[in-house]
Each structure stands twice: as structure tokens, then as C-alpha cells.
Amino acid sequence: MEVKMNKEIRNYQESMFMGLNLRQCIFSLLAIAVAVGIYFGLGDYVGQEVTGWLCILGAAPFAACGFFQYHGMNAEQFAWAYIKSEFLYPKRLVFQSEDLYHACMEETMNLGEKIRGDGTAIQKKREQRMEKKQMRQKKKSRRSGAFD
């Protein structure tokens, strides 16, 4: 005795009638009802061959909706996602690159271009001057008296 198991447990579908699940059964019955309605409704007005083709064309969308699945979405979910992405929330995506290295080094490069020298060395000298200035301010701000 052999039991079939799906590789992915989420793909399991309980079969209701002849291997079809409930959704597929409902849409199959709906497709049959549409085909029968078209056959009896248009059979007297149009020829037999044309009626047969109209039955197929009328029932096909309903039958397809029962079996359609795309990225885990059924037909209604897919249609809603398509409408939202194309009509309700459309947006134009424009690619703009971001050069992080250039953004970080922009100040140093501009400084080097102005002075026509090594911007990195000049930047380091400025930082050292700022550190010395801060150290002097800290020394001045200290109180040097015995009384508070």
C-alpha cells in the first residue's frame, strides 16, 4: 500500500468529488449551468454549431477560475492584486543610484579641489586644530580656585 504525500504540506487539497476540491466543484457546476443556459437560451435563435461555440466561450472563464492559481493566489485574489497594482496604486519607479563613498568623501574632495592639494591631509589638519581648540576650552572652563 502506497500513500502519496505532498513535498510541501501547504499544497495539500482535500478532494470532495472525483479528485476535485470544493472550489473546483462549485466553479465546474457554475460553468455547466452557464453552458446549459446559453444552449437553451440561444439554441432557437442561432444555429447548432454557433450555439456550441458560445457555450464553450461562456463556460470557459468560470471553469478556469476554479482551477487557476498563481503564486498561491486564486483567480479573485489575483484579479484584485492586478487591479490594485495597475489602476488603484500605480506608481512610476525611477532608478537613482546612490554613491555612498562619494557622499562621504564629498567635503574632502571639494576641499582638495579648492586648495589644489591633498584634501585628506588638509581635513586631518582641520580636525586636529578643532581637537586642540576643544582641549583649550576645556582647560579654561575648569575652575582653579580652592573655594567654590
Image: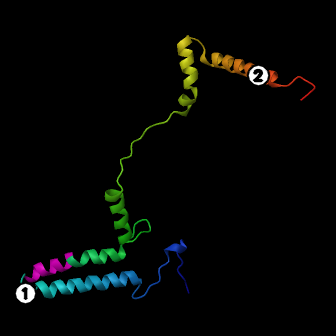
| Residue 5 horizontal side relative to residue 130, left or right | left
User: Would you name the residue on which mark 2 appears?
Assistant: 137
Q: Does the magenta stretch include residue 49?
A: yes
Q: Is 69 rendered above or below residue 133? A: below
Q: Would you name the residue on which mark 1 appears? A: 44
Residue 133 drawn at (x, y percent): 73, 19
Q: Is residue 5 left or right of residue 83?
A: right
Looking at the rendering, the stretch of residues picked out in magenta corresponds to: 47-57
Task: Give how far across and how far down residue 40 sits, in percent.
Answer: 14, 88
Q: Residue at x 13, y 86 (%)?
A: 41
Quarter of the image holding residue 53? Answer: bottom left
Give percent across and percent down for residue 25.
Answer: 36, 84
Which residue is rendered at x = 26% and y = 85% of the image? 32
* Mark positioned earlier in the residue sequence (2 or 1): 1
Say if residue 20 shows up in the picture: no
> Which image quadrant: the N terminus?
bottom right
Q: In this view, does 48 lie above or below 144?
A: below
Residue in the image at 42% along x and 87% along y:
16
Measured in 3D between alpha carbons, the distance from the residue under mark 2 to the one under mark 1, in whole angstroms, is 103 Å
Q: What element carries label 1?
A: loop
Q: What element carries label 2?
A: helix
Residue farthest toward the top in the current orientation of the protein: 116
Percent x, y of residue 129: 71, 17
Residue 19 or residue 60, whichever sits in front: 60
